[in-house]
Amino acid sequence: MVGSQLGLAPDLEPEIPTVVAPGMPGRRVHIHPAALFVLKRLAAGVLTLLVVSVLIFICTSVIPGNAAVITLGKSATASSLQRLEATLGLNRPLYQQYLSWLGGILHGSFGDSAVALAHHQVDPSIASSIKNPLINSFILGGITAILLIPLTLVLGVLTGIKANKAVDHAISLPSLVIAGLPEFVTGSLLIYIFFSELNLLPPVSLVPPGQSPLATPNILVLPVLTLLAVAVGSGIRQVRLGMIEVLQTDFVQFARLNGIGERRVLVRYAMRNAIANSIQTIAQNLQYLVGGIIVVEAVFAYPGIGTYLVTAVLARDTNEVLAASIILAALYTVINIGADLLVVFLVPKLRTELV
Amino acid sequence: MSREGEEISGSAGSSGGWGDRAVGRRTFLQGVAGAGAAVGLGGLLSAYGDSAASWASAGGAVQAGPSALPGGKPKRGGTFTVGCLTQGSEENLFPGTAIPNPDCVRDYALYNLLFYPNAGKELYPLVPGLALSAESNAAATLWTFKLRSGVTWHDGKPFTASDVAYNLTQLWSSASANYSSAFLVGLVDFSNVKVVDPLTIQIPLLVPSAQFPTIFAWFNFGVLQAGATPATAATKPVGTGPFMFQSFTPGQQSVFVRNPNYWESGKPYVDRLVVDSSFTDNNAMLNALVSGQINLLVSPALEQVRQQMTSKQVQILQSASASNTYAFGMRVDTGPFADNRIRQAFKLLTNRQELNDGALSGFAQIGNDLQGPNTQYFNYDLTSAYDVDKARSLFKKAGVLGKTFVLPTANVLPGMIESSTIWQQQAKAAGVNIKLKVLSPGDYWTSVGGAYVRPFCLQVAQALPSLTGQYRSLIQYNAPYWDTHWGAQTPGGNAATSLLLSAEASQTASTAQRLWDQAQDQQFHEGGYVVWGWLPYIDFAAKNIRGLKASSAFNFNNFRFQDGWIA
């Protein structure tokens, strides 16, 4: 019983509704409203991705000149153009190209890079060229996320509890200032401090092909710090605000009046509710990482998906742009859905509203 | 315009060196080749570059550093790691489809050209590469190239004339295999190229050309082994160059190792050459250099050069002369610029110093609307005037005062967007409007961006070591980079083309000078280019790098990393 585990009174436990399966008169299928919510949310996510995929595809297709024309450039002859267009399937109607591309993705194939084909590269498949940048970005984003979540919560709760006191000012003010700076400014400042002045950390994060960034962990420190500096500030502010609001609610006041210890009030009553409210904020910050990582990778010359996307756009390699864009969009959607579900499961009020 | 330390006169006879001998008759490179043979390679290559003490000024432009790093006794070993801005998956190992950079860094390491531009202030006389000399018949329609002996490919096979013939007939003649094939198509009679002996090749021409060998000093003409194709070069490139292939990951990193059998005795000095082309940002690249993660940096941003002039964290290497030509181009045959009064007005309204200061940080030398500086017969005496009132008057006479001209621009090379914006303001002061149409960098020099068809454009032209090369590249009828459609104008197009062909065919220095003067005079008064600046090549090196040089031909003096060592 999820409700009981979360400490809800038995009389608040939701009544499970009955859903009649369509086309099956007389038979009743019991679907828990929470499961129904999950299904709806997943369906919405898939729909969102479909719409996004269509938009990305149209955007890359309507730009004058196809990938073959751009790639072959000056060396294009009628026959070489025809050959590359046929190889890439660019001679088919747009809807067929889209369906073929979508079908490929569902089977785990992103197709071939037009540029790599034109230059006779050994392996032109996008799946292999995007693999390492993707892993590198996951490592960078993953480490940042692992640090971002507890840091946001701890500092946010602390500033909320100590609102308008010295600790609050000491944390809030600098975090707000840093959060207001663009990534490349923060990155440059960190390079100045940790490389130019202290000579402690490398100012760029070069990773030779085939090598993991984890082999030289010190190259990750400054990019992670940059991402954290930008993302943590706004998160702290939101959690702080949530904490202040929760501390002023009736149930916290009531708990205090009942003589429950302050520590227990904070941990058991206030923090849980404040944290649940902060999940969306944290999710937003994680979503920011998906975009922010592009700038940070450029500042530190880190070979991740951001760098991959930038060079693909510059080379007008449509398939590479499509692959990187849809992966980033999928990541964005997954974080969004994950946060929605987590909030619903953590906040009793929302869960009961599902019924 | 004349440059410091050089007296420019109207005749080739007084320009000295190669000019006297080569065009005099038939012996295009014999003097240079002979010098090489007589004094050995060291004597020949000592002509490269200028001393470190010679960098005080360059025609009024800012000179940030010397054109040669400190020398001394070369030291063997170590790795050169070269940083370049990335070209992503577009990067390749095939010279025919190379674009600057980092493709050229790799190609100059792997392959050799037949001839190289000179590393001095002038781009001529040529320096022998795989070819030692070039000699023509009296009509300059049949050229005989003598090739270097004792050169071996990276796989151990000997380099011969058959290899050169293969390149000419199979690769350099094909638009799909070579971006610069148009330099040769219509000029070379490919079907009658003849291998005379293993070290001699005869190249017949369809039209006479007295400076024909200079065309081969171009980065797309790296010599491949007979039988090589773009596909084989992409996986197993075999060259004759100073470094041998080890690995290549496009847009990331490529690794080369020292060629122990390289024909320049004792060179290269370093064991490995790594090209890191993963950078998307200039600052990150400079940080990598300062922190020691790379030790050479190709083409830093000009504001970084300014900054390093004071902070001195790295060595700055700057060519003593400047050939990289910044211009606005106007089509002379059709559209609004077919009226020469409008072209003249645009030339007159151009404040070149302001463009140089604002767009190129003051590093450029001021251009005079002509292509091909630092080549034989170039006319420095013509000086472009700046007269806004006259420009306005010409616009008025042409009936376009207050009209708007659309200028496509893009952020491809340093200063392109900035110069377009500054020029827009300058045009406004003369009574016309320029509307900027900012294109994607990847599209600018493609058919998608309207390249070589559009009426108005920007051009940044790399140097070829002769007016023949430069005009064949940009100006002559149907040139590969035919921005201005010179020769297609009516009336006068045919006569203009004939004049260029006559100048190109001239074997005697005085006649050639006279004809090239006429051709340049035409360009100056009627041509479609507003050439406002010549930018030198500037590169950075870590403080412990020695022996490398700069020239106005290309970065690091044609990426001659075989000359350098780590102190």
Image (spheres, rainbow, N blue to C red):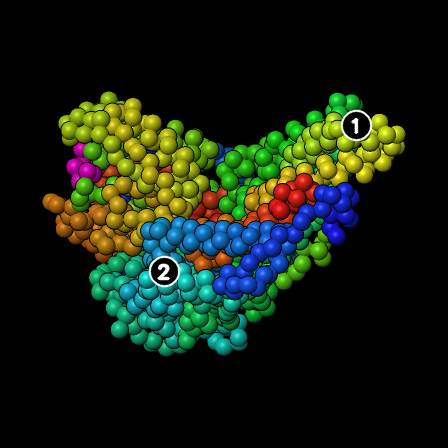
Q: Earlier in the sequence, mark 2 or mark 1?
A: 2
Task: Give a yes or no on whether discs 2 and 1 share a subunit.
Answer: yes
In the foreground, B349 or A331:
A331
Q: Position of residue B464 (x, y in %)?
A: 36, 52
Residue A95, disc? 2
Does the magenta segment cover residue B376?
Answer: no
Does the magenta segment cover residue B339?
Answer: yes
Q: Is residue A261 left or right of residue A277?
A: right
Residue A50, disc? none
In the foreground, B211 or B347:
B347
Q: Chain of mark 2?
A: A
Specify start and end residues of the magenta stretch as a single range.
Answer: B336-341
Looking at the rendered structure, the kind of residue marked 1 is Gln
Rounded to the nearest angstrom, the CA distance separating label 2 from label 1 is: 61 Å
> How busy is the neighbourhood of tag 1: few (under 14 within 10 Å), some, or many (20 plus)?
few
Residue B282: quarter of image:
top right
Q: Secondary structure at mark 1?
A: helix
Q: Residue furthest front?
A: A26
Residue A253, disc? 1
Do residues under tags 2 and 1 come within 8 Å of each other at their CB atoms?
Answer: no
Q: Main secondary structure of the magenta part?
A: helix
